[in-house]
Image (cartoon, rainbow, N blue to C red):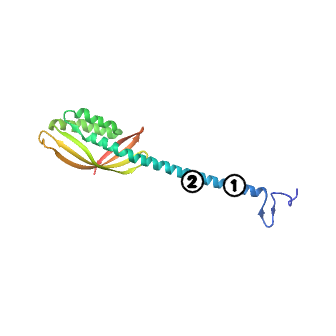
């Protein structure tokens, strides 16, 4: 086989011909396909992540409101039964700290002073939300009555509520007064 008859030969000052041209074209096409697949993958992931974040935004506010209201609402006659139920919607160490606070301070004080407290959310907003973690701001009103002050005393507060998703449920991991 001579150099002039080869389809893989180089002619006319270094131009690629025949089989080599097909290899170059196939490589370029493969590179474009890989680039498009990567772009589609990144775009798809961002879309999925954005949908999960938006879904979190709609779920966390009611979860935060329900849990925080339950944490701060109690009747002195039933405080031992009411407040521990709220702990079911709290995470690990925060749950343990909350239960300890109930046993050591809140329940004894509520019984001694015959406190009745009703907490309600007046306003709320999402500070940040991801697929498994969110932060919500709640504006609370607490109406308190006691044996020493039978007329209702209203107090307001703002709390930052951190939530983590666990097994499909949003659990409160921290409540911070601000």
Disc 1 target residue: 27
Which labelled disc corresponds to residue 107? none
Q: Vertical placement of 74 versus 137: above or below?
A: above
Q: In the image, which is nearer the foreground, mark 2 or mark 1?
A: 2
Compared across the picture, whether 47 is left or right of 27 comes to: left
Please give the name of the residue rendered at 24% of the width and 43% of the height, measured from the top-left corner.
Answer: 119
Q: Is mark 1 on a helix, strand or loop?
A: helix
Q: Vertical placement of 178 versus 116: above or below?
A: below
Whether residue 173 appears in this view of the structure is no
- Callouts 2 and 1 close, C-beta under 8 Å: no
Residue furthest bottom in the image: 13
Compared across the picture, whether 101 is left or right of 40 comes to: left
Label 1 Cα neighbours within 10 Å, binned few <14 / some 14-19 / many ≥20: few
Please give the name of the residue rendered at 22% of the width and 45% of the height, measured from the top-left corner.
Answer: 142
Label 2 vs 1, first from the N-terminus:
1
Residue 53 x/y as whole percent: 43, 48
Please give the name of the residue rendered at 54% of the width and 52% of the height, measured from the top-left corner.
Answer: 42
Whether residue 22 appears in this view of the structure is yes
Disc 2 target residue: 39
- Tally the marks: 2
- Name the image quarter holding residue 113: top left
Compared across the picture, whether 4 is left or right of 177 comes to: right
Q: Is mark 2 on a helix, strand or loop?
A: helix
Q: In which quarter of the image is the N terminus?
A: bottom right
Residue 37 x/y as whole percent: 60, 51
Residue 168 x/y as whole percent: 42, 39
Residue furthest left in the image: 148
Compared across the picture, whether 154 is left or right of 40 comes to: left
Residue 136 x/y as whole percent: 34, 49
Q: How far apart are marks 2 and 1 (CA)?
A: 18 Å
- Name the image quarter holding residue 4: bottom right
Label 2 Cα neighbours within 10 Å, binned few <14 / some 14-19 / many ≥20: few
């Amino acid at each position: 086989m001579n150099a002039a008859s080869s389809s893989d030969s180089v002619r006319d000052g270094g131009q690629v011909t025949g089989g080599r041209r097909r290899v170059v074209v196939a490589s370029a096409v493969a590179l474009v396909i890989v680039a498009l697949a990567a772009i589609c993958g990144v775009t798809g992931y961002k879309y999925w992540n954005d949908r999960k974040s938006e879904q979190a935004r709609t779920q966390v506010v009611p979860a935060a409101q329900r849990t925080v209201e339950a944490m701060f609402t109690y009747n002195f006659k039933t405080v031992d039964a009411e407040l521990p139920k709220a702990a079911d919607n709290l995470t690990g160490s925060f749950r343990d700290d909350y239960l300890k606070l109930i046993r050591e301070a809140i329940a004894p004080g509520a019984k001694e002073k015959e406190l009745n407290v009703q907490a309600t959310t007046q306003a709320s907003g999402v500070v940040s939300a991801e697929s498994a973690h969110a932060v919500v701001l709640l504006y609370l009103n607490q109406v308190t009555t006691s044996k020493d002050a039978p007329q209702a005393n209203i107090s307001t507060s703002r709390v930052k509520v951190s939530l983590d998703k666990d097994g499909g449920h949003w659990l409160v991991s921290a409540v911070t007064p601000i």
